[in-house]
Amino acid sequence: MSLLLGGVLICFCACVSGTKAKEEKPAAPHAWLADRSKYILLPLEDIEHPLDMPQLISASYKGKDYFLNAWVKADTAGLNIIIINELGANMGEISYHNGSASFSSPVFSLSFRPEYIVADFQLCFYKAPALRQALEDCGLSLEDTVTGRRILQDKTVITEIEKSRNVVRLINHLRGYAYTLEGNFE
């Protein structure tokens, strides 16, 4: 199980590889969605609607598939993603509160910036007008489709998000990873 979770976390954090080596301490939490596109995380008030549910997460990265369970609670007070094993034990937690993102785990000692997972979450579940402005501010654009969203750099699609009532699928073409969230998103 620990190998599985480690692989999924590596998949989620794959986008870190494109960041700049010498980076000043940011005034606001951010993630590099493309090499020259510094996305500033949105405030909690921009979530489309509150979530409080279990989710099955399946991810793929570099030809490998990973699966894990999580409990996601997201609203205007904060974001908490608790990663749990098959027995319901806490394996780790990603949180975003008061403009700060963090990762803690009683099992894993991984060092990564949780802002990347928060950014992907925001791309999937935050209001389109706020996302559109934040993406334009970093040189990207948001395109709404019938079934989801697309993030573009110039005219190239770098991220696609497909949404239905029970499944959200994010494909990051630029960084080479994808994941599917299964839950009740209505």
Image (tube, rainbow, N blue to C red):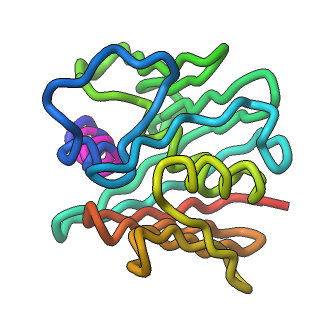
Name the quadrant containing residue 54.
top right
Q: Position of residue 155 (x, y in %)?
A: 43, 81
Q: Position of residue 121 (x, y in %)?
A: 57, 47
- Describe residue 122's horizontal placement relative to residue 35 as left or right: right
Say which residue appears at 25% left-offset and 44% top-offset.
10
Say which residue appears at 82% left-offset and 28% top-offset.
76
**Residue 30 vertical placement versus 162 (above, below):** above
Residues rendered magenta in the picture: 6-12
- Describe residue 4's horizontal placement relative to residue 178 as left or right: left
Nearest the viewer among 20 and 102 is 20
Nearest the viewer among 86 and 7 is 7
**Residue 8 vertical placement versus 21 (above, below):** below
Q: Position of residue 41 (x, y in %)?
A: 57, 35
- Describe residue 153's horizontal placement relative to residue 132 as left or right: left
Magenta portion: prevailing SS class? helix
Q: Quadrant of the C terminus?
A: bottom right
**Residue 166 vertical placement versus 126 (above, below):** below
**Residue 169 vertical placement versus 115 (above, below):** below
